[in-house]
Image: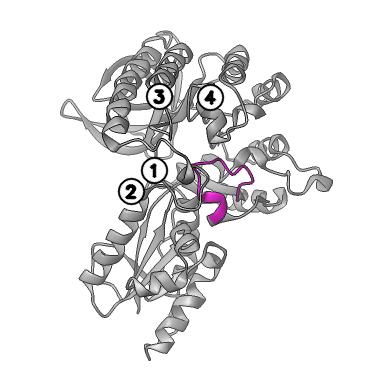
Amino acid sequence: MITVAFHNLGCKVNAYEADRMRKSLLDEGFLLVPFEERADVYIINTCTVTNIADRKTRQMIHRARGMNKDAIVVAAGCYVDIRGREQLLSDGTDVAVFNQDKTRIAEIIRHALWERDLFVKEEEPAASPVSHSDPYAHTRAWIKCQDGCNMFCSYCIIPHARGRIKSRRISDILEEARDLSEEGYRELVLTGIHLSSYGLDRPDEGESLLQLIRAAAGIDGIQRIRLGSLEPGIITEEFAGSLKEIPKLCPHFHLSLQSGCDTVLKRMNRRYTTEEYAESVAILRKFFSHPAITTDIIVGFPGESEEEFEKTVSFVEKIGFYETHIFKYSRRRGTAADRMEGQLPDSVKTKRSRVLLNLRERDKRNYMETIPKGERLELLLEEPVQIEGKEHLSGYTREYIRAAVPLLGYKSGDLVTGLPLKSSDDILLLTDIHPGCRS
């Protein structure tokens, strides 16, 4: 049996696509092995969102070659779309697979094996199922609802790698979601490259993101619906009010910010102001009790002055995020920002990143401290963890707070509720545990 090792880089959409590729290979009789083991085929599902992502992609390609010089090394995804097949092949990759061809991965691998006179015996598909999500059975599953982006933010190469927006039909998504429910998954994460644009490419069909969320929430067995990253402009009173009426929706909203300064946002070609962003957050907090608001911020964008950066710091302090993901600006050839004057040195980016990292830790503590002590939190159990020398099961609340409970006979995939007790090693401990969903 031909052995295949996988390594995935990048976003949740990439993780989803990697899982689909794994499943197609399993169905065709290939044997999946850990990436650290010797394999006949190594597949790196690549990312190119930053220079660091590019470097990791090249490192994994070289690592695969080092583990078995005779192996077929495959690079798939965004790095391939940007660099091009010829460049990848000259870099030592044997097979380069564009994003649009990931669904044909088994066919492509078989052809590569045939060219080397390696024939795959016809065997029964491997019995072990593929995970659509975290490596723990029956917890959360990601579903890619759309691909591509039309925004062309000045720093972003992804529209060039993924193309224009393409939405899956609701019926297609629901069919996959029902299969996941039957497999025992309890939470669905609706994700995409630009989720807020879902349905806009097919306006005559009248399928919207809100319709999709409602339909997914109606699937038996699914207890939670979580949303991927949203643009602040989609948050209106009507939209938030409609979301509030969906009990299964998790009050965890990732609203992409990128900068807390209007002049930087304009240079980034972001289509909102800080005032509009703050209004979106206020709307969410109006309709949801204690929602977790998370975001992304880029520091060191071309021309970002100290004054502009301080405006970002002040805005972040004003909003009070639950969690902030901070990235140093990465120059990408082919983007508008690459041609801008005022490219900043890495030392400045690092200094500014540290400031926001310290603020992030403070904001997260502040959010945790404001959780009402008498409010029961719902926890979807996932994996065992040792806390203070005792076995616990950890998972995530609806707000995406990592929490844990004593074993008490529970298992991965169970839903329980409990009262906040204390935090230990960045995990919130719950007490007074009861089975079932929060009412």
Residue at 56 percent across and 48 percent down: it is 143
Alpha carbon separation for disc pair 3 and 4: 10 Å
Residue 296 to residue 121: above or below: above
Q: Are marks 1 and 2 in contact (CB under 8 Å)?
A: yes
**Other-residue count near label 1 (Cα within 10 Å), few / some / many at <14 / 14–19 / ≥20:** many
Quarter of the picture containing the C terminus is: top right
Could you tell me which residue is drawn at 51 percent across and 40 percent down? 186
Q: Residue at x 57, y 50 (%)?
A: 159
- Which residue is denoted by mark 2 in the rendering? 52
Task: Specify which label sits upstream in the sequence, 4 or 1.
Answer: 4
Question: Dot 1 corresponds to which residue?
Answer: 330
* Residue at image mark 4: 263
**Residue 368 at x, y percent in the picture:** 37, 15
Q: Which of marks 1 and 3 is nearer the N terminus?
A: 3
Left/right of residue 332 with respect to residue 56 in the rendered view: right
> Is residue 281 inside the magenta stretch?
no
* Other-residue count near label 2 (Cα within 10 Å), few / some / many at <14 / 14–19 / ≥20: few
Q: What residue type is labelled 3?
A: Ser
Whether residue 222 sits left or right of residue 427 in the image: it is right
Q: Position of residue 424 (x, y in %)?
A: 24, 22
Q: Earlier in the sequence, mark 3 or mark 4?
A: 4
